[in-house]
Amino acid sequence: MPTETAGKWRPFEVTIVEAIRRCPGPPSRDILVLLELIESTEIRKSHDQIVAAIDEYFGFLDPAQLEQWPPGVLGVRESVLEQKRRWRKEEEQSKRLLEAMDGMTHGGQGGLH
């Protein structure tokens, strides 16, 4: 099996958006399984695309009406956005660390002697 699928695997964040868009409506067992999978998976990229696919599926195009959304769906959506915030913070911290290390090795203040 791995030899047949080698080179065909794609990132979760790409395939989950496609899977959401293929789910039949009105809300079915399929979308509920995908939402459970999303909520329990570490997602590193494409958070906005995943949230947009969820919003489109459920017809939630007006963020001002968040309180009307089903709590389970809202929880999954918030979980994805929380991961986005966390990954963004970690990326910023890594960038600052690399910049500090670069400054130290290239004669910046506090450089290595």
Image (tube, rainbow, N blue to C red):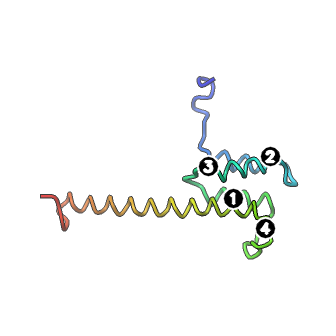
Q: Which residue is mark 2?
A: 30
Mark 2 neighbour density, 10 Å: few (under 14) some (14–19) many (20 or more): some
In space, the residues marked 3 and 1 are separated at their CA atoms by 11 Å
Instruction: Choose the circle earlier in sequence order: 2 or 1.
Output: 2
Q: Which residue is mark 4?
A: 69
What is the x, y in percent for residue 24?
A: 84, 48
**Residue type at numbered disc 2:** Asp
In space, the residues marked 2 and 4 are separated at their CA atoms by 19 Å
In space, the residues marked 2 and 3 are separated at their CA atoms by 17 Å
Mark 4 neighbour density, 10 Å: few (under 14) some (14–19) many (20 or more): some
**Residue type at numbered disc 1:** Val
Q: Is there a contact, CB below 8 Å, between mark 2 and mark 3?
A: no
Above or below 56: residue 14: above
Above or below 63: residue 16: above
In space, the residues marked 2 and 1 are separated at their CA atoms by 15 Å
Q: Is there a contact, CB below 8 Å, between mark 1 and mark 4?
A: no
In the picture as drawn, the residue positioned furthest to the bottom comes out as 64
Image quarter of the N terminus: top right
**Residue type at numbered disc 4:** Trp
In space, the residues marked 4 and 3 are separated at their CA atoms by 22 Å
Mark 1 neighbour density, 10 Å: few (under 14) some (14–19) many (20 or more): some
Q: Which residue is mark 1?
A: 76
**Residue type at numbered disc 3:** Thr
Q: For the residue labelled by badge 2, is the local secondary structure a helix, a strand or a loop?
A: helix
* Viewer-side residue, 94 vs 14: 94
**Residue at x 44% of width, y 59% of height:** 91
